[in-house]
Amino acid sequence: MKTRSQTEFLEQGQLREQVKFWRDPALNNTEMLRATYVTHSFSRHTHEGYAIGVIDAGVEEFTYQGATHRAIADSIVIVHPGEVHTGHAGADEGWQYRMLYPDVGLLQRAIAELQESSAMIPYFPNPVILDDELAGQLRRLHMALEATSSQLERESRFLWTLTQLILRYAQHRPIVLPISPERGAVLRVQDYLHACFAESISLDHLAQIADLKPLRLLRVFQRETGLPPHAYLVQHRVQQAKLMLSSGRAIAQVAYDTGFTDQSHLNRHFKRLVGVTPGQYAIGCRGQRVG
């Protein structure tokens, strides 16, 4: 029985192979790949770092550690550094997937956020993982790495997703202790975000302001505010945009002054949070009906 993703994949007739590759300098030049493969077959090869991805549609089949594995839509694939493996279509329609290739140091940093040690290299005994929630997190991470210019969002999603992967599926899973109230640290971060909302902001800088480790900051900030820092920042930028628009400032200038990449970037977030476009909001502020 085909999953919904596989059915859509077939109905859309997406049989043309497509590949997009890029690197993210904010994540130690981690390589990223989004691809559709049908006839392509990877010969036996290894990676210097991890290969971690999510299958969007179709089926990938690969040999790894002496066995053949099948990764269906919405499954997670993990290949360890230095491990020989292959890759080819496991069904006639091929497969679509999103991959990232973090180096060992980034996984060590993630596990150090959890257990105060960076010496351990996480090992994942299952190369194919079925976890819809985590697959969704990984997919959203990859989409953010591809589309968003926010360094804070990319770094936050990256760290959070890697630590969730370690906590759920690493062979040795750290025990995460409950977090204590850190209201003062959260207030310092909020004050900084309010004052510097138009600037490019990194997770490490916020952690320094809070005097907390980055993962702990993400946990306490979300508990105190209900939002991760990057979402809180976007919300504050939109609030500032509303004030500027109500004073008659041009939309393009508002986008620039509030730290959005361009007007379309502002439009997307403004409509998502306010329910109308910046143009509609500006018209309404001038006393005209918005319909």
Image (cartoon, rainbow, N blue to C red):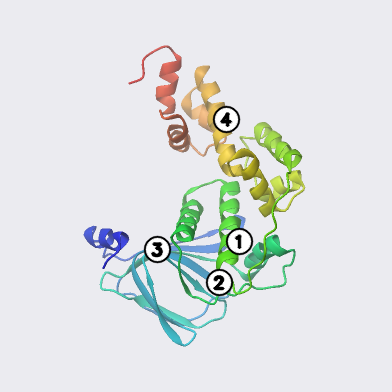
The quarter of the image holding the C terminus is top left
Q: Tell me which numbered mark, 1 or 2, is placed earlier along the sequence.
A: 2
Viewer-side residue, 85 vs 2: 2
Q: Tell me which numbered mark, 1 or 3, is placed earlier along the sequence.
A: 3
Identify residue for label 2.
50
Location of residue 183 in the rendering, given as x and y in whole percent from the top left corner: 73, 39
- How much space separates mark 1 and mark 2, taking CA atoms? 14 Å
Label 4 Cα crowd, 10 Å radius (few <14 / some 14-19 / many 20+): some
Which residue lies most toward the bottom here?
66
- How much space separates mark 4 and mark 3, taking CA atoms? 39 Å
Visible in this render: residue 25? no
Q: Mark 4 or mark 1, which is nearer to you? A: 1
- Kindly identify which numbered label has been placed on residue 257: 4
Identify the secondary structure beneath mark 2: loop
- How much space separates mark 2 and mark 4, taking CA atoms? 39 Å
Q: Mark 4 or mark 3, which is nearer to you? A: 3
Asked if residue 138 is positioned above or below residue 287 in the image, the reply reads below
- Kindly identify which numbered label has been placed on residue 74: 3
